[in-house]
Amino acid sequence: MAAVQMNVRIDEALKDEGDAVLRELGVSASDAIRALWTYLADRRALPDMSTTADEAAREAERQRRLKLVRESAGMVHRAFVEAGLIGEDEDLLDGMDDAELKDYRRQLAYERYMNRNGNWEAA
């Protein structure tokens, strides 16, 4: 098997940090690159390179979105109560299983589509 040489441009400080970690692990830079290329060839994908900072950022975004959903659900609930459609203590989704929730969401999406496109005839 013929060997090839690879040259890579990388920030000097990053290289120094990486070299220090590899030395601590007892691995050469060539061995690390060879292991990465073997992984790529075997799996046809990158290894998981997420960091704890990435995970923290994803979790923060998830929590932000959940907060928006809760706030939106609260606004819908208040509007239904104010319109007299439900009581203050009633839960709109109480007793629905996942399949029923999916059907409910599909029906709402269909109604929005029909209303937007002017094809909905009020009953």
Image: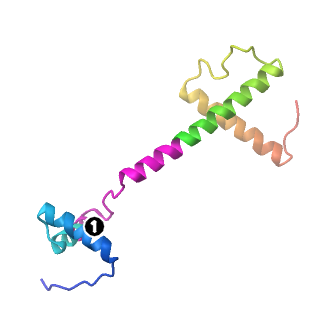
Dot 1 amino acid type: Leu
Asked if the magenta segment contains residue 39, the reply would be yes
Taking the image as shown, residue 95 lies to the left or right of residue 6, namely: right
Give x and y (percent) for residue 26: 11, 64
Q: Quadrant of residue 51?
A: bottom left
Give x and y (percent) for residue 78: 75, 24
Residue 112 shows up from this direction: yes
Give x and y (percent) for residue 82: 82, 21
Outermost residue toward the right in this view: 122
Q: Residue at x 63, y 23 (%)?
A: 93
Q: Quadrant of residue 21?
A: bottom left
Quarter of the image with the N terminus is bottom left
Q: Residue at x 82, y 49 (%)?
A: 117
Quarter of the image with the C terminus is top right
Out of 92 and 111, give the one closest to the viewer.
Answer: 92
Badge 1 crowding class, 10 Å Cα cut-off, few under 14, some 14 to 19, many 20 or more, is few
Q: Residue at x 60, y 29 (%)?
A: 101
Q: What colour scheme was applied to this rendering of the protein? A: rainbow
Residue 41 shows up from this direction: no
Please tell me whether the stretch drawn in magenta is mainly helix, strand or loop. Answer: helix
Out of 110 and 69, give the one closest to the viewer.
Answer: 69
Taking the image as shown, residue 46 lies to the left or right of residue 78, namely: left
For disc 1, the marked residue is 40
Out of 2 and 82, give the one closest to the viewer.
Answer: 82
Taking the image as shown, residue 41 lies to the left or right of residue 106, namely: left
Magenta stretch in the rendered image = 37-62
Asked if the magenta segment contains residue 59, the reply would be yes
Out of 117 and 85, give the one closest to the viewer.
Answer: 85
